[in-house]
Image: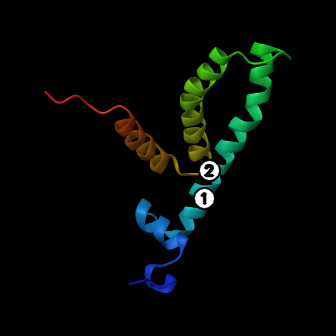
Amino acid sequence: MVEKKSERGGWMQRLSARWGVRPARVLIILLVFACTGFTVLFLKRPVVAYFVGDGEQPALFTVLYYVLILPVYNVFLLIYGALFGQFRFFWEFEKRFFRRLLPQKRA
């Protein structure tokens, strides 16, 4: 059976339910994600130019960049979350993310 869009709600309602926030906060949270992504995007070129110059990027640098961008992105996510008044949401988001990324060993 195919559900109608009105029965399952729009994307705002689905994100609101998934994150446990009011629909108005969904827009603020999405804005934080957008600002974080743009910041990382704008910082990439000068950082790469500083370490590599105008030459071609070595494969090792590319691997290191992708490994190191994860903590940088997460720090910016917390900074923008705090600036937009959503620090608690993003702190919980980060804790869930790192719990999934680094599962705990069971005794």
Specify few, some or many for label 1: CA neighbours under 10 Å numbering under 14, 14-19, or 20 or more: some
Q: Which residue is mark 2?
A: 32
Residue 41, given in percent of the width and then of the height, sits at 72, 37
Residue 16 left/right relative to 106: right
| Residue under the image location 56 percent in, 51 percent down | 85
Residue under numbered circle 1: 28
Alpha carbon separation for disc pair 1 and 2? 6 Å
> In the rendered image, which quarter contains the N terminus?
bottom left
Residue 72 appearing in the image: yes
User: Residue 18's x, y, as percent?
Assistant: 42, 63
Q: Residue at x 54, y 29 (%)?
A: 71
Please provide percent x and percent y for residue 45: 79, 28
Residue 20 appearing in the image: no
Q: Residue furthest left?
A: 107
Q: Quadrant of residue 77?
A: top right
Residue type at mark 1 is Ile
Q: Secondary structure at mark 2?
A: helix
User: Do callouts 1 and 2 mark residues in contact (Cβ within 8 Å)?
Assistant: yes
Question: Does 50 sit above or below residue 43?
Answer: above
Q: Tag 2: Cα neighbours inside 10 Å, few (<14), some, or many (≥20)?
A: many
